[in-house]
Structure formats: structure tokens, C-alpha cells
Amino acid sequence: MRGSGLRADRLFGSTGRFCALVVFLVLVLLLGGGSRSDIASLIVLRPASALFGGYALMTGDYGKIRDLGAPLWLLLAVAALIVIQSLPLPPGVWHHLPTRGNLEAIGGIIGGAETWRPLAYSPARSANSLFALLVPLCAMLLYAVQPPEQRNRIWPIFILFGLLSGFWGLVQLTGPEHGPFYTYRITSPGVPVGLLANRNHQAVFLACTVLIGGWCFRSLDPGSARARLLAPATIAAMFFMLPMILLTGSRAGLAAGGLALLAALALIARAPIVPQRLRISRAISIRRGLLLAAIAGVVVLAAVLAVLFARALSVDRLMTEDPADNLRFAVLPTLLRMARDFFPFGSGFGSFEFVYRIYEPENLLGPRYLNEAHDDWLQLIIEGGLAGLAIAAVFAAWLIRTFIGIIRGKAGLGRDRRLMAFGVIALLLLASLVDYPLRTPMLSTLFVLAVLEGRAQKSKSVAKASVRSETNGFTGPVVTDRAPRPIPEH
């Protein structure tokens, strides 16, 4: 009995919980890089997510799960909306819904006019959308049951993931366009997409890791021996990410990378590990401002060299392609019409691909097709209607309120960490204006973790623990949130 109790303590203790989160994140990285519903790896990822979510519930920390607050309730609201849209409706109700005329006429021909039908155009795709929520829900639950000192150790893991995905992209460049190094059948051939399926998603993910790298550098403890090694390693990782973003050929990624670089440099400028004066010799020393300018200059130089020598596709596409000829812009009037026609009930989550075929204009018919709207904000209105828009509005209001609270809070390492998380949120939401990154399990997991990290702590027990641990990030405890100590010249 005593031995079983010790095993349970190890399994559900802080180390076991963190190991479970790491294993789950590795599974998401390896199996969750695509956004399509027919990816074979989802057969493993989604049941595994349910198991890991069950493990989080078995820890018994329901108070911590309740502390998730608004993010958890909003995710459950989306799940409830999908279920409601999938419920069969009586024929008398269904026939009065807008834009059902074609289906009603077909039903009359085949003799199914009195069949009960759901509001969703594609119930199977709606079910897929519901199951897709398992991955971010599991990420929420596993994050909630982590001790505060473990939560800060999540972010360096994403830097390692970014390096792995970037190096795998380099491997892809060494092989044929449709070679075995591409992990998804439908992908961007000839482009270093890494462990994802889409060039835009790879670029945005790498941009997020650049920002996270800036935070990890900011959190380094100047008194730690490991920090002397990790500081140049972190900068080197950021140097590697930026050229890889350019090589993807993603214009959205190019913009996201630029914004991430600016935010990361702002975090690096506040890092206590950067000395007030770096002494090279007895006669030569460099002040902190010049040193930071030199770091920024090297980063910019690396990007310029990538453009000149690697022939970065994103810059070439930006210079040579007319945005008006891009399918994303050409289809915008059609998307607006769909949003108007299906308002306020929506067409049902997951139904966009089928509904778009009804509206697709003749001048856009061709070998290219839209499986998603490439504008998740508009697609949310098309599929979710007024209820989906209301959920998004509540989430936006919550984000703004939380962000204002962080800005008004005490300056220090804890606030900078939450601002980094909001930077990741902003990058993914901005990318959603021209793409659908949050439909990828890996990026949706990163998104919910950033939302939870950026939210204000409400639990008194969590808040007290955070005071002790919010500086316990990349290399162990940094002393406090106070202003950086003077660092001896070296």
C-alpha cells in the first residue's frame, strides 16, 4: 500500500505533471502540423489528447482548473454552439432558415422533404470541428494543473520545437519537391515547411519562437553559470529562425517575423544579463546601448544576407506578385456575401468548403480551390453566425481588459512574460486575417497556452506562488522583479 502511494505521488506529482505536458506537446508537434480533417495522424492525436486530459482531471486539482476562468468557458461555449448547430430540427423550422432553398428543392425531388435536418450544412465536418477542440482543451487542463514554477519552463520547449521544425525544413530543401521528408500529403512542395503542412503556418510559428526567444533571453539570470552559455545559444537560435521564415516564401510570415523581431529586441534590451559595459580589454569596452545596437544590427544583417544569397521567396513574391491577382483578395466579395446570407444562424462549423462551392463564381473556377476562407475572422461569421460573433466579441473584450490590467501592473519580469504571451496571441490573430493558423493543432495549442499565460492571476494561492516563481524561467531563479542589479564589467 505504501509503495502504491509513492508511485501515485510520482505519477501525479509536479514532475509527473510536467512530464505529461512535455510528452503531450511533443505529440502535438509531431502529429498536429496540418489543418485538414482527413489527416491520418489525427487518429492518434485526438484520442491521446482525451487520455492526457483525463490524466489532468485525475490529479484532482479542480480548483486550479476552475481558475482557468473565461478562456475555458469560451472554449466550452464554442463546443456548445457546435452541438446546437448539429441538432436535427423539425421540417417546419428548418424550411424557414435562410439559404436552404437549394437543399429543400433537392429534398423534394428525392422524397425527403419531411426529413429532420440540422442547422449545419455538413454535420460530419461539424463533428470534426468538435473533436478538434480536444487538443486545445487538453492543453488548457495540463497547463492548469502545473505548479507555477513549472509553467515558465514551457516556453523554452517551443524554441526547441522551432529549431527542430526549421532544421527539418532544411532537410526538405535537400530532397525532391514531393520527397519523403514532407510529413503531409497535401503541403507546400519545394518549400521548407518543416513539421507543418503549410508555408504560412511554419513562418508564423517560427515568428512566435523568435518572440519567445527574446523572452527567454530576458529571463536569464546573470548570476547563473548556465546563462553564460544559454545567452549566445538563444541569440543564435533567433538568427536561425529569421532566415528560415524568409525561405518559406510566406508574406504573412515576413510581416509576423518583422513584428516579432521588434518585440524580441525590446525584451532583449531589458535583459539583466546584458552588462552595462562589456569590457573586451583593458583599453576597450562597449556600453550597453552600443552592444544592443550591435545585436540588432547582426540580426538585421542575417535577414539581409538571407534575402541576397538564399533568394528568399517571401521577398520575391512580395515584389513580383500583384495582391489584386491573389485568390485571397479576389474571393473577398464572395465571402462577404456568404457572411450576409447565412447571418444570423451560420452555415455550421466545418461546412465552409461545401458551402463555398454553391457561391464560387465562374471567374474563379480553376485548379486552385478554397478548403478554408483564408480569413478566419470572416469564416467564423459565415459558419458561426451571430452566436460565433458574440463569442469572439466576448473573447476580444476579455483580452483587452486583461491587457490593460497587465499594462497597469507593476513593471518587471512577470509583466514582461505576460506581454510576451500577448505578443504571441497578437501574431496568431493577425495571421488569422489572411490565413487559418488556429485550425492547426500545434498552433492552437500554442495559442491557448499564451492566452492562459497572459491572463491575470486571480487565485490567491496561485498569485502567491507566482511571486516566488515568475522569475524561475529559463535558467532557474532570478532574484526578484526589481530593477536589474549592476553587473560587474567583464
Image (cartoon, rainbow, N blue to C red):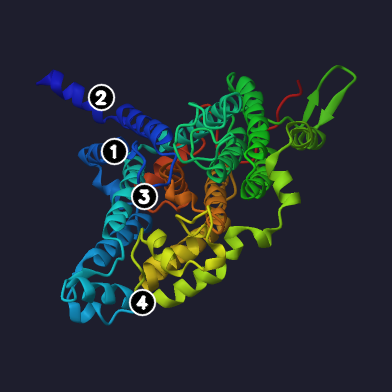
Left or right: 19 as drawn, with respect to 175:
left
The kind of residue tagged 2 is: Arg
Q: Earlier in the sequence, mark 1 or mark 4?
A: 1
Secondary-structure class at tag 2: helix
Secondary-structure class at tag 3: helix
Secondary-structure class at tag 4: loop
Query: In this rendering, which labeled residue sits more in front, label 4 or label 3?
Result: 4
Where residue 444 is drawn, which disc sits there? none
Q: Earlier in the sequence, mark 2 or mark 4?
A: 2
Asked if the residues shown at circle 4 and circle 3 are in contact, with their CB atoms under 8 angstroms apart, the answer is no
Q: CA distance from mark 3 to mark 2?
A: 26 Å
Circle 3 residue: 460
Compare residues 423 and 7 and report the one nearer the observer. Answer: 423
**Residue occupying the far left of the picture:** 1
Compare residues 133 and 141 and report the one nearer the observer. Answer: 133
Q: Position of residue 36 (x, y in %)?
A: 40, 47
Dividing the image into 4 quarters, which one contains the N terminus? top left
Q: Earlier in the sequence, mark 3 or mark 1?
A: 1
Q: CA distance from mark 3 to mark 1?
A: 40 Å
The kind of residue tagged 1 is: Ile
Where residue 10 is drawn, which disc sits there? 2
Where residue 99 is drawn, which disc sits there? 4
Circle 1 residue: 43
The kind of residue tagged 3 is: Lys
Query: In this rendering, which labeled residue sits more in front, label 3 or label 2?
Result: 2
Q: Is residue 391 visible?
A: no
